[in-house]
Image (spheres, rainbow, N blue to C red):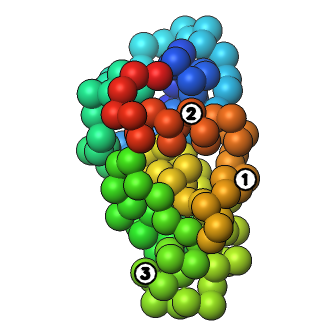
Amino acid sequence: METYVFAFETPLSVLTAVETDGMLTALRFGGSVRQTEAPTPLLAETKRQLLQYFAGERRMFSLPLAPEGTAFQKTVWEALCGIRYGETASYGEIACRIGNEKAARAVGMANNRNPIPIIIPCHRVIGKDGTLTGYAGGLPVKEKLLALEKSGGKM
């Protein structure tokens, strides 16, 4: 198993991308940009697509993803990818989309454990009453991501 890590600056924060066996397996907020090696082609493409997203030039990502999680978590993460750019959905709506309308809390926990935020758009999930709820990067980051998408502009 070969794993590569690459941190890079974005208008939002430093992001650290992790590649394992040719698949993107994680994207984390924070990290150090003092790299000694050039990024792999996949990690360079991840950076390129994210920078396009932050510039308002990309609405969908086309990267090979392999998030690690339970079968339920993966089902939730797949459903998150169905939330369109600039739109939001509640935890209950996601629960209904995966065929388990009573699983809103479990959807919230799976959302919380999403290892590839932004690309798997967990920031697009909000409370039933429209309020913003927790986010791995913090609520100000979630607000910025949603504002970027709502305006279709630049960050």
Q: Quadrant of residue 82?
A: bottom left
Residue on which the image places disc 1: 134
Left-right relation of 82 to 100 = left
> What distance separates the C-alpha of mark 2 from that of mark 1?
14 Å
Secondary element under disc 1, as helix, strand or loop, is: loop
Q: Amino acid at mark 3?
A: Arg
Q: Is residue 71 above or below residue 38?
A: below
Disc 2 and disc 1 in contact, CB within 8 angstroms:
no
Left-right relation of 69 to 1 = right
Q: Is residue 47 above or below residue 3?
A: above
Residue located 48% across and 13% down the image: 37
Secondary element under disc 3, as helix, strand or loop, is: helix
Query: In the rendered image, is residue 35 in sight?
Result: yes
Residue on which the image places disc 3: 97
> What distance separates the C-alpha of mark 2 from that of mark 3?
26 Å
- Viewer-proximal residue among 69 and 89: 89
Residue located 56% across and 69% down the image: 90
Q: Residues within 10 Å of mark 3 (few under 14, many from 20)?
A: some
Residue on which the image places disc 2: 144
Q: Quadrant of residue 133?
A: bottom right
- Viewer-proximal residue among 63 and 121: 121
Q: Amino acid at mark 2?
A: Lys
Q: Where residue 78 sits in the image (x, y, percent)?
A: 41, 67
Q: Is residue 102 above or below residue 93?
A: below
Q: Is residue 44 above or below residue 79?
A: above
